[in-house]
Each structure stands twice: as C-alpha cells, then as structure tokens.
Image: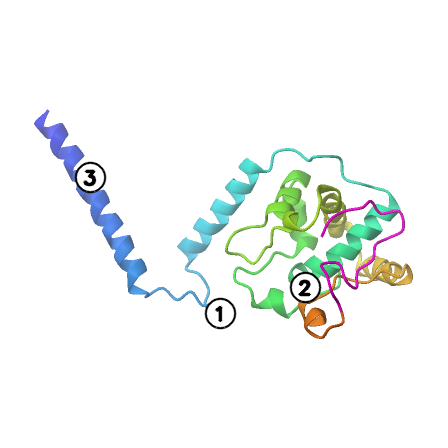
Amino acid sequence: MRQRMKLVGGVLAAMLILVGAVVAFIMSGFYNIAASQEHTPLLEWTLETLSEKSIARHAGELPAPLPTDSASLLHGFEHYRAMCEICHGGPGVDRGEIGEGLNPRPPRLVRAARGSSDAELFWVTKHGIKATGMPAFGATHDDASLLQIVAVVRMLPDMSAEEYAARAAAVAAAGLDTHATPLDSVAGEASGPAAGHTHAPGAPAHTH
C-alpha cells in the first residue's frame, strides 16, 4: 500500500511540475506568436491533428444534398470567388495577399478538398476554425448558400484553369457583383450588409 501511495504521489508531483513548467513558459512570453514565424514541428503536428480529429468528430451529416443545378452553382461560384479565393486560391489562381500572410497557411482546395467529406467541408465553412483565420460563414449565410459554396469546392479538384476562368466570366456575364468590402463602405460606395451584391437568377433567398 505504501509503495502504491508513493507511486501515486510521485505521479501527481510530476504532473504538478509539468503544469508549472507550462504555465511558466506561457507567462514568460518567450514563444514568438508572430504569423511570420513558423510553428515548431511538435506544435504544428498538435494543432493539425487536433483540427482534423475535431472536424471529423463534429461534422455530422449534411443538412441537405449538395445542389447540382446551374443557378445554384453559379451562385456558389460567385460566393467562392468573393469569400474564399483570396485565401484558398482556385484552379490556375494563386492565393491572394491575405492568404499568403496567414499562419497556418490556408490549404489549396484544388488539392485539399479531396481529403475531406462533403459534411466536413460544410461544417468548416459554417463554423470556421479557431485561431486560423477561417471565418464562420454560418453567422452571415444560411445553410442553402453554404451548400452552394461546398458544391463548388467539391468541383475544384477536377476543374481546369480554363473552366474556372470560364465560370468567372459567366458570373460577370450574368451581371453578378461580388460582396461589398469594408473599403467600399468606408468610401461611401456601399451601405448595408448586402450593398453592391446581387445574386444569380433563380438563386434561393438567403441572409447575409
């Protein structure tokens, strides 16, 4: 019994020392949190594994099948170009300056989408991922609009640069404007959450 108590006491003491060391490290400010500084391999593995396992656990099922009609896909493509392309790029399109400056670097969905289920893509689009720069678009878009975006993301790995450019031209030909930006609002060129933004003909109503 005494040996068991000593063993338990030793384990508890070791845990307290470890916790104290972690707290001391955090309070020291030694770790560089600059986005320009890469994570250590151990921390990078920890964050990536935590993210992958958490998404897989919480994704659940899609609220409805992904749309396949042309109007929904045009609408989803408009959203993708306005909201996602700057960080994730597209076929023949590099990430924008914001995406290049983030750490961790946003995945190129032309490749990464193959490794995720539709439900996982939907969950991430709706709920975002903490401390990564990935927004929770469910706060501004309904499920129908998010499903349209996911439907486009699912197509990206099999889409050529020429097809992507053709779809961008189709959005422009349909008279669709991308989402208003904060700079538009500051300049007085847009007002309200959907200013400067129209939708594909036949697209379902949704919130912003």
**What amino acid does circle 3 point to?**
Leu
> SS for tag 1?
loop
C-alpha separation, residue under disc 1 versus residue under disc 2:
18 Å
Amino acid marked by disc 2: Ile
Q: Which residue is mark 1?
A: 36
- Part of the protein shown in magenta: 190-208
Assess disc 2: are there few (<14), some (14-19) or many (≥20) residues with their C-alpha within 10 Å of its C-alpha: some
**Residue 159 visible in rendering:** no
Would you call the spot at circle 3 few (<14 residues within 10 Å), some (14-19), or many (20 or more)? few
Residue at the farthest bottom position? 187
Q: Indicate yes or no whether the magenta region holds residue 112.
A: no
Q: Residue at x 67, y 54 (%)?
A: 109
- Mark yes or no: residue 183 visible: yes
Give the Cα separation between the discs numbered 3 and 1.
38 Å
Q: Quickly name the residue at label 3.
A: 12
User: Magenta part mainly helix, strand or loop?
Assistant: loop
Circles 1 and 2: CB distance less than 8 Å? no
Q: Quadrant of residue 119?
A: top right
